[in-house]
Amino acid sequence: MIIKNVSILLIFMFTIVPVYSENSENLDYWMEKGKNLVKEMEFEEALTCWDKALEIDSKNRDAWDSKGLTLYHMKKYKEGITCFDKAIEIDPEFSYGWCDKGQALKALGRYKEAIECFDKALSINPSDKFSKQFREEAVKALNNINPNR
């Protein structure tokens, strides 16, 4: 029994587990680190991670979208929209990118444009509950501005 346990321990000890450092060129490392920093509300540090990820792969729509969402949380809506536009340019059928752009436009009071983005998101993914909800909020806000609409 002892020999079997030692064998299992040795196999475990010598299994190669990749370890990434701050200087890592691994996209997954920076994406995961950025997500964790956003959860901790460490937005400035998360932006650094998204930038590192984009240095590795400038065509990564998820990195652009994540950077945009981080900027959105920082209330830097215009900068966020620029990132969402890049994500959408890379993948025009990326419904979450359209929804996220709509949210930033809604935050800026640009309700008509926001509604267009939510409509595009819903044309791609009709069951997206968030796009439906956010669209309703934008329509309501627009109607409050233009009650005779």
Image (tube, helix red, strand yellow):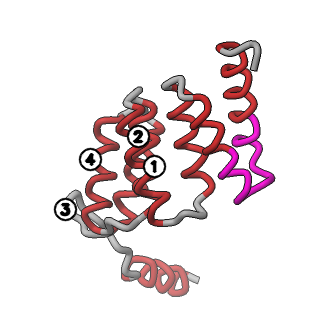
Amino acid type, callout 3:
Asn
**Who is closer to the viewer here, 105 or 66?**
105
Instruction: Quickly name the residue at label 4.
Output: 48
Instruction: Quickly name the residue at label 3.
Output: 23
Specify the farthest residue to the left.
23
Q: Which residues are magenta?
A: 119-133
Task: Give percent across and percent down for residue 46.
Answer: 34, 43
The count of marks equals 4
Instruction: Quickly name the residue at label 1.
Output: 84
Q: CA distance from mark 2 to mark 3?
A: 26 Å
Q: CA distance from mark 1 to mark 4?
A: 17 Å
| SS for callout 1 | helix
| SS for callout 4 | helix
Amino acid type, callout 1:
Phe
**Who is closer to the viewer here, 55 or 127?**
127
124 falls in the magenta region? yes
Q: Earlier in the sequence, mark 2 or mark 3?
A: 3
Instruction: Quickly name the residue at label 2.
Output: 80
- The quadrant of the rendering that contains the C terminus is top right
Dominant SS of magenta comes to helix
* Front position among marks 2 and 3: 2
Query: In the rendered view, does 127 fall on the left or right side of 137?
Result: right
**Circle 2 Cα neighbour tier, 10 Å, few/some/many (<14 / 14–19 / ≥20):** many
**Who is closer to the viewer here, 141 or 16?**
141
